[in-house]
Image (cartoon, grey):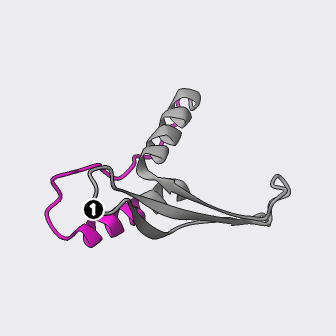
Amino acid sequence: QELTTVRVQDPRVQNEGSWNSYVDYKIFLHTNSKAFTAKTSCVRRRYREFVWLRRQLQRNAGLVPVPELPGKSSFFVGSTDEFIEKRRQGLQQFLEK
């Protein structure tokens, strides 16, 4: 049975303390699928790249619904760490769907 596992891990704040800081996430993929030549891969991606991916999927999905992304809120109530973790979980769910 073919299996593909994807994990969103290790959020890191880049350019911390500057006006153009952002968070990126490690995306780890493992599969035994014959469709993939590399059985594991790991990249770092930021939120806006997930937005781009979702747009591309929507463009090509026809009537198939594309999952939602977690919100992009600059008015989050709570700690920054809490927001980053909630977003990480939402990105994980997006990729799993």
Residue that carries the numbered disc 1 in the rendered image: 17
For residue 58, above or below residue 38: above
**Front-most of residues 60 and 48:** 48
Q: How many marks?
A: 1
**In which quarter of the view is residue 62 placed?**
top right
Mark 1, secondary structure of its residue: loop
Q: Which residues are magenta?
A: 62-90
User: Taking 59 as reference, is 87 left or right?
Assistant: left
Q: Which corner quadrant holds the N terminus?
A: bottom right
The secondary structure making up most of the magenta span is loop
Residue 35: x percent and y percent?
82, 52
Residue 8: x percent and y percent?
51, 65
Q: Which amino acid is tagged 1?
A: Gly
Circle 1 Cα neighbour tier, 10 Å, few/some/many (<14 / 14–19 / ≥20): few
**Front-most of residues 29 and 79:** 79
Residue at the spot x=16%, y=68% of the render? 78
For residue 62, above or below residue 11: above
Residue 25: x percent and y percent?
48, 62
- Taking the image as drawn, is residue 71 in sight? yes
